[in-house]
Amino acid sequence: MFRLMALHWFNPPVFVKTDRPGVTYGVNHVEGAAEELMKWPKRGPKWKLALQSCIDGFEGRVSPQEVRMAFEAAASEEGMLRSSG
């Protein structure tokens, strides 16, 4: 029997660069944020905070909106943030 994991949604999405030139991805849930973080080549202090925030979001210790704010800060620090979709 399969158990589906509920996604931890946030809004508005955070738009980030992808590994495909010219393609932007709108991240709108904690799971997607964690997945994108793991793809980034640069991993500074805000990246580490965002990853910990994702873990805390999975465990229910912080809200999805708090994860969103940490993810957006990391995306900005790492040069991955896009202004819009």
Image (cartoon, rainbow, N blue to C red):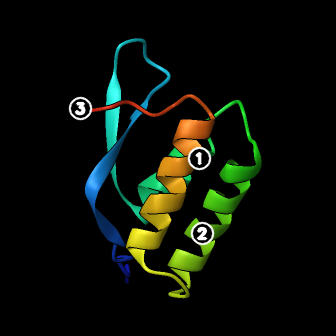
Where does label 3 land, which residue? 85
Identified by mark 1, the residue type is Ala
Which quarter of the image is occupied by the N terminus? bottom left
Q: Is residue 62 left or right of residue 68?
A: right
Identified by mark 3, the residue type is Gly
Of 77 and 50, which appears nearest the observer? 77
The residue depicted at 39 percent of the width and 76 percent of the height is 5
Circles 1 and 2 in contact, beta carbons < 8 Å: no
Q: Nearer the viewer, mark 1 or mark 2?
A: 1
Could you tell me which secondary element the residue under label 3 belongs to?
loop
Q: Nearer the N terminus, badge 1 or badge 3? A: 1
Of 22 and 72, which appears nearest the observer? 72
Q: Nearer the N terminus, badge 2 or badge 3? A: 2
Taking 34 as reference, is 78 above or below it? Answer: above
Q: Is residue 4 left or right of residue 57?
A: left
Which quarter of the image is occupied by the C terminus? top left
Numbered badge on residue 49: none
Circles 1 and 3 in contact, beta carbons < 8 Å: no
Q: Nearer the N terminus, badge 1 or badge 2? A: 2
The residue depicted at 46 percent of the width and 71 percent of the height is 66
Q: Residues within 10 Å of mark 2 (few under 14, many from 20)?
A: many
Could you tell me which secondary element the residue under label 2 belongs to?
helix
Q: Is residue 65 left or right of residue 78?
A: left
Q: Quadrant of residue 49?
A: bottom right
Numbered badge on residue 74: 1
Where does label 2 land, which residue? 53
